[in-house]
Amino acid sequence: GQNIDQPTEMTATEGAIVQINCTYQTSGFNGLFWYQQHAGEAPTFLSYNVLDGLEEKGRFSSFLSRSKGYSYLLLKELQMKDSASYLCVPMDSNYQLIWGAGTKLIIKP
Amino acid sequence: NAGVTQTPKFRVLKTGQSMTLLCAQDMNHEYMYWYRQDPGMGLRLIHYSVGEGTTAKGEVPDGYNVSRLKKQNFLLGLESAAPSQTSVYFCASSYLLQVTGELFFGEGSRLTVL
């Protein structure tokens, strides 16, 4: 079956760094997305990794290891507005997105 | 630039009533999707479309119908609403995901079925 494993909830301090890990099992693989979803809002796109390695975009970076079925999202210089759910979304061989419940990140002052 | 617009944003129905949710996008995207999201759960794909005049079933299509008569519009219909269809519905559109990697979402439509 297809499966995503992320922590349900994480807590971090404003100004700090946090890493949200994701392991996945899919029928084939065509890339992995990270989305941010604030409570009561729609998801918004953060990153898309197809090849192994680190992609950096401002305060956010995403890493992928296809052989390990592993990805992480790194958030630096945390701000209160970063309190949200972070969704790790792999795409399978049929280009279908596999959505889990994500990781709820709570930022404390 | 409106992006993806969903109407209505909120609706309360009685069991057995019918309704249609409208999704409109102004980005000339070929691909459009309808998802539902229940509390504490991930998005589940209801139906999707890869172009004008085409539709396909997703993960949870039962109880829903869709139409894509115009490229910019994707309609989701509930013929006989049930309490199990109480949810938040999100429409999204995209180019080829494997090329651009990004889904553009509407703000969501919150449906309650009594």
Image (cartoon, grey):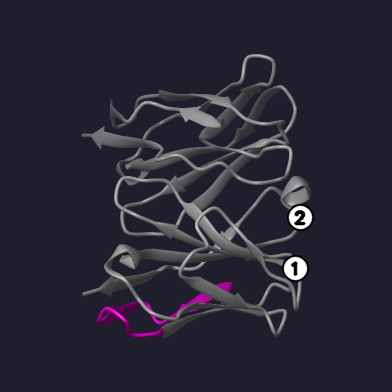
Residue B37 appears left or right of B27: left
B23 or B15: which is nearer to us? Answer: B15
Residue drawn 50% across the image and 43% down it: A99
Tell me, yes or no, if residue A62 can be seen here: yes
In the image, the segment drawn in magenta is B3-18
Q: Which mark is residue B30?
A: 1
Tell me, yes or no, if residue B1 can be seen here: no
| Residue B7 percent location from the top left of the image | 44, 81
Q: Residues within 10 Å of mark 2 (few under 14, many from 20)?
A: some
Chain designation of label 1:
B
Q: Is residue B13 magenta?
A: yes
Residue drawn 67% across the image and 31% down it: A27
| Amino acid bearing label 2 | Leu
| Residue B4 percent location from the top left of the image | 56, 72
Residue A52 occupies quadrant:
top right
Circle 2: element type: loop
Q: Mark 1 and mark 2, same subunit?
A: yes
What residue would you read off at disc 2?
Answer: B96
Residue B79 vs B64, above or below: the answer is below
Circle 1: element type: loop
* Label 1 or label 2, whichever comes before in sequence order: 1
Residue drawn 45% across the image and 46% down it: A36
Q: Mark 1–mark 2 contact, CB under 8 Å? A: yes
Real-space Cα separation, disc 1 to disc 2, in angstroms: 8 Å
Name the quarter where the C terminus of chain B is drawn.
bottom left
| Amino acid bearing label 1 | Glu
| Residue A45 percent location from the top left of the image | 56, 49
